[in-house]
Image (cartoon, helix red, strand yellow):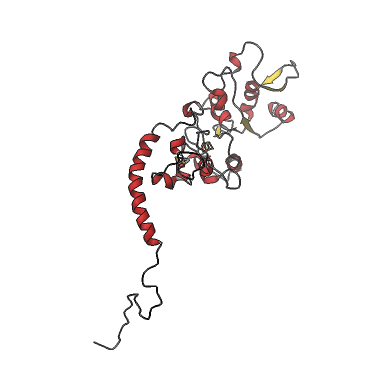
């Protein structure tokens, strides 16, 4: 806790505050508390998460919310929750700025993809050192280069989708949209980046995308195993179009799998070569 107390006392400067986990609402709690870290030496009482944020946010050079709970509330902030949990921007305000003029930076994910987090920290360090322009963020405060594309756009199975070839059970290598994949409408780069050393990325390795990086997660993606709204229409259209395309491609594929007919060992040349006869009119 030493660094936390030092930072709050102004003895640690500059520092970047990294928040993990959602922010419960202590204002709705008449007695006790929802979440706390450390003890206030003056009162002997626990220091709540709300209080730590109140103490540290004004002094931080930048704040990074890491993971879907810290960014948007996540599972703790589901409908019906008792704690009033929320994301950091809900707590501090979406237009909040650090003393260096920086907005909150959100790196969602459940869990956060580790390289996404480290790359964001590194970017901010470059920015503070004057070696990079202001970090580009979208309207949900996500780094645009990490969250600008959908799961579907990077998915290894997108070729199956385009051909209207769908999995109907787990274990199939085909597109998972009919068994619940939300990839076409979810901003996440793990299908491109993988999880560890470039390996993994939910649909790439057989797991449906449940939208864990999204501000509407989990409520707007439940029940998880049902096909997303729109999937029936888009996959039906893709099924019709894809069926024709698949048929035509199978003919082309059979053709390009055969060698050209002029490759043989017979005593005649049938390549179409025509020798030039110089000096003849
Ligand atoms: S598995 Fe999901 S992300 Fe991949 S192609 Fe199908 S719908 Fe798109
Ligand atoms: S692919 Fe979907 S479920 Fe997997 S990490 Fe990305 S958003 Fe979450």
* Front-most of residues 64 and 257: 257
* Front-most of residues 7 and 66: 66
* Front-most of residues 280 and 30: 280
Q: Residue furthest bottom?
A: 279
Q: Position of residue 92 (x, y in %)?
A: 56, 24
Residue found at x 59% / y 15%: 27
Q: Position of residue 105 (x, y in %)?
A: 55, 34
Could you tell me which quadrant the C terminus lies in? bottom left
Q: How many marks?
A: 0
Q: Position of residue 221 (x, y in %)?
A: 48, 29
Q: Position of residue 10 (x, y in %)?
A: 69, 28
Q: Residue furthest top?
A: 30
* Front-most of residues 108 and 130: 108
Q: Would you say residue 91 is visible in this rendering?
A: no
Q: Is residue 246 left or right of residue 199?
A: left
Residue found at x 30% / y 86%: 278
């Amino acid at each position: 806790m030493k660094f936390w107390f030092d930072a709050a006392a102004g003895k640690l400067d500059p520092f970047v505050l990294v928040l993990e986990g959602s922010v419960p609402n202590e204002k709705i709690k008449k007695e006790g508390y929802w979440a706390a870290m450390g003890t206030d030496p003056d009162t002997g009482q626990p220091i709540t998460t709300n209080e730590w944020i109140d103490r540290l946010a004004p002094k931080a050079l930048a704040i990074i919310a890491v993971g879907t709970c810290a960014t948007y509330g996540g599972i703790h902030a589901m409908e019906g929750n008792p704690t009033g949990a929320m994301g950091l921007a809900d707590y501090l305000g979406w237009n909040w700025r650090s003393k260096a003029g920086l907005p909150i930076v959100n790196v969602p994910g459940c869990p956060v993809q580790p390289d996404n987090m480290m790359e964001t920290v590194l970017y901010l360090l470059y920015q503070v050192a004057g070696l990079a322009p202001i970090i580009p963020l979208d309207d949900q405060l996500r780094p645009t280069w990490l969250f600008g594309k959908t799961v579907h756009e990077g998915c290894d199975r997108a070729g199956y989708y385009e051909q209207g070839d769908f999995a109907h059970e787990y274990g199939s290598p085909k597109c998972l949209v009919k068994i619940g994949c939300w990839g076409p409408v979810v901003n996440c780069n793990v299908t491109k980046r993988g999880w560890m050393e470039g390996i993994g990325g939910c649909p790439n390795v057989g797991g449906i995308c449940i939208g864990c990086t999204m501000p509407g997660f989990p409520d707007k993606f439940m029940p998880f195993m049902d096909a997303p709204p729109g999937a029936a229409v888009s996959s039906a259209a893709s099924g019709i179009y894809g069926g024709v395309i698949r048929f035509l491609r199978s003919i082309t594929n059979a053709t390009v799998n055969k060698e050209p007919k002029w490759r043989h060992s017979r005593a005649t040349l049938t390549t179409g070569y025509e020798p030039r006869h110089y000096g003849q009119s």
